Amino acid sequence: MNPKMALAPDTDQMHVSWAPQRRASTGVAASVHGISKRFKKTVVLEDVSFDVAEGESLVLLGPSGSGKTTVLRIIAGLEQPYTGRVILHGQDVTDLPARERGVGVIFQSYALFPRMTVEKNIAFGLKIRRRPRKERKETVNRLIKLVQLEAHRKKYPWQLSGGQQQRVAIARTLAYKPRVLLFDEPFGALDAQTRVKLRREIRVLLRQVKVPAVFITHDQEEALELGDRIAVLNNGHLEQIGTPDEVYNHPATEFVATFLGAANLLLGVVVPGAVEVGAVRLPATEETKKFRVGQSVKLVFRPEDVCLSPDAKLPEGCRRLANGVIEEVNFVGAYERLNIRLDLAPPRQTESTAALDDVTMNPPDRMTGVPIMVTLPKPEATAIRYKAGDRVAVGLTSFSVLPNYTLARQR
Amino acid sequence: MVKIPTLRHVRGFDVARPVSIGVMLAIMLPLVILPLLSIFLFGTSKGLGVFWSSLIAPEAIFALKLSMVTSFWATVFNVIFGLFAAYVLSRYDFWGRNAVIVTISLPTAIPTAVAGFALLLLWGPNATLGRLLDSHGKHLMFTAYAIILANIFVTFPLAFGVIKPVFDTMSSSLEEAAATIGATRWQTFWHVTLPSLRGAIVGGALLTFARAIGEFGSTILVSGNLAGRTQTAPLYIFAKFNEGQIEAANAIAIVLALLSFIIFSVLFFARDWLEFEAQEK
């Protein structure tokens, strides 16, 4: 194979100072580079960079105050970054006003024009671009059909439900073929059921129109469902960016682990081929690769990654952690949630002789041991009826090892 | 229309209802209703013929026309300026902004005679600006323009006061949305902002017009009260009353009272249409 040809895709991945025409072929629809923002003396964003690929939907996930809305407003041109550049389809738009950027913003309040009908709202972008009447009419008809509002075309925004208003808002931006769609907390104003329904509809719609989209949300479930990739923001920092599977199953930081769903955290130290948690050793050759022996780490695992056994025999692929006592069992619908206290300081424990009678923990009412949360799927929970006070062997099917910084500046 | 909530905590016949309605009407009767009624009763007591002939007297027609025209131009100016001032003061923050807001609203609190006097002091024949005009052979005081100027001064805060709160409460995301869609500032103002202000503009205009057409204190000082030249309808009523021609005064009084009544009925009953935006919430 021609080595040059093999190299080509790689060089295209680089995104610093390519000429616009060059970048247009990379498949990157939008990117922000080193965005910082401060309001007065408060730092809102610090050095945030990411790309959105053509046709991709990226979710900016973070708690309120994490700066996610500011990122969106900077891309839209409603806010000026302190440093950094915004690039849309290869064109540096950092210094362009909002109206020249050609982005579509779906505001949380939808911001439909109250004195215009559905049709007129959708046609607004074309009207101000002085497009011929015929083209306007055709586009409006096509879009009204696309968002299934044929019966409501003559209505005013206040006559529509929240979901319908949102569809008008989307159609209104699609009319002028936006380069990227930006959704600001799109489901914030809706009830839980409508939310689930609408986000499926939006996914389908986005696949049809193939416009890249950036969503903003603080809802992790929404992020996992909507995003091809998720960027987790915290305190103005980009903590991790990756596919839903990556950020959920391999969180890069403690914040990501705890913000996306429930997570158990245990402090440990790296020993050759394992992590030592208390007096027990959890075999972890793969996970500890990038750490040196003796380094302080955090062991992170999700409640559903725990396997339990009423006798000492843990299933295949489940690495033994310790023994524990069940403290509480809660039935929460789809699964059962157990609070377990781990005995991390058994008197003598080896891989071969770890039997349940080694558990020398105090009775549950004494509340000793390290608490963890475990969830069991329904079939497993019904097969073995665990109850408070039961002694169990605890193992992990998967987990992550994160560095445990003792000083903030090591970060 | 506003729905009146029922008093659900009251059981059986509510004595307070007829009593309180009665007391309210009894207070209103001598203060508002009877005086208004007496204009109509007295004005038509000598027959409609007398009423009609006093109404179509050339001086009376002139006074009514002058009032209409001067009030109209004062309204046009104050609505446009009020809109502009409200836009500037709700969109831009600057040093002294609050002081400007207070100053704009001030004319409501100033006695109208003081307003007229102030205008005379500035534009009168012996005043600074007045003399400047004089040297160009022009006069402002004691002309119809002086009446417009006085009307503008007195009704200055009305349109502004109605429009400004609507600007303040208007969500900025509408204008931001228009900008991201690609609208220029002017397009945004014309297509998005202005339509939302329709109710406030109409309301402010009616209020200004109603106030201007009845203006007396400042007008009598700056107009010179020259019958057939600078005499507005309220001045005409006053002049005829002084001359003892009660019927002549009364005919115009009826017209002015009816006009105010119509304007305020429109304001009241058209509220649903004017305040369209209330339904969006």
Image (tube, rainbow, N blue to C red):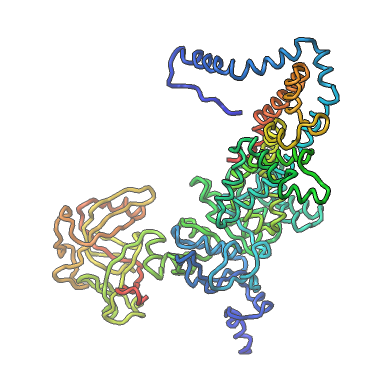
Taking depth in this image into account, of B112 and B208 the one nearest to the observer is B112
Taking depth in this image into account, of A62 and A360 the one nearest to the observer is A62
Quarter of the image for the C terminus of chain B: give it: top right
Taking depth in this image into account, of A149 and B138 the one nearest to the observer is B138
Give the residue displayed 67% in from the left and 31% down from the top.
B267
| Residue A151 seen by the camera | no
Q: Is A256 on the left or on the right of B250, as rendered?
A: left
Residue A34 screen position, x and y as percent: 52, 74
Quadrant in which residue B185 is drawn: bottom right
Residue A139 screen position, x and y as percent: 75, 54
A72 w.r.t. A161: above or below? below
Q: Is A306 on the left or on the right of A37, as rendered?
A: left
Residue B143 screen position, x and y as percent: 79, 39
Task: State the count of labels.
Answer: 0
B20 w.r.t. B186: above or below? above
Residue A58 screen position, x and y as percent: 54, 64
Quarter of the image for the N terminus of chain B: give it: top right
Give the residue displayed 78% in from the left and 19% down from the top.
B248
B213 w.r.t. A145: above or below? above
| Residue B242 seen by the camera | yes
**Residue at the extreme front:** B126
Taking depth in this image into account, of A112 and A326 the one nearest to the observer is A112
